[in-house]
Amino acid sequence: MVVTESYELRELAKLLNWNPAHCKVILKQLGVDPTQPIDEETAAKVAQKIRRQWPPQAA
């Protein structure tokens, strides 16, 4: 079994340095329920949509 990283909406928004409400809209556009944990692949798609690097580089 492969365990992938998953994120909560606020956590993802913080990692991307982006507004959680906007992340939520993007997730809905991708057909993902924002109240559920967000997997690595979906997080990468969100980052791509807002032209952010994924995975985020540690500051």
Image: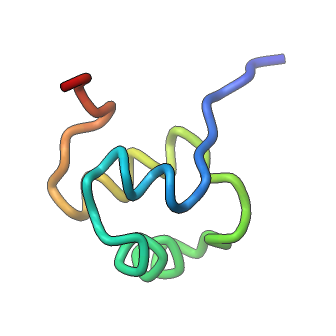
* Left or right position of 52 against 4: left
The quarter holding residue 39 reads: top right
Colour scheme in the image?
rainbow
Q: Name the residue at the top extreme.
A: 1
Q: Position of residue 14 (x, y in %)?
A: 37, 52
Q: Position of residue 51 (x, y in %)?
A: 15, 55
Residue at left offset 25%, top offset 54%:
17
Q: Position of residue 26 (x, y in %)?
A: 40, 75
* Left or right position of 7 against 17: right
Classify 34 as above or below 57. below
**Front one among 50 and 57:** 57
Q: Position of residue 49 (x, y in %)?
A: 25, 63
* Left or right position of 18 against 5: left
Residue at left offset 58%, top offset 75%:
31
Q: How many marks?
A: 0
Residue at left offset 50%, top offset 60%:
10
Q: Looking at the rendering, in which quadrant would you find the N terminus?
A: top right
Q: Looking at the rendering, in which quadrant would you find the C terminus?
A: top left
Classify 33 as above or below 55. below
**Front one among 37 and 1:** 37
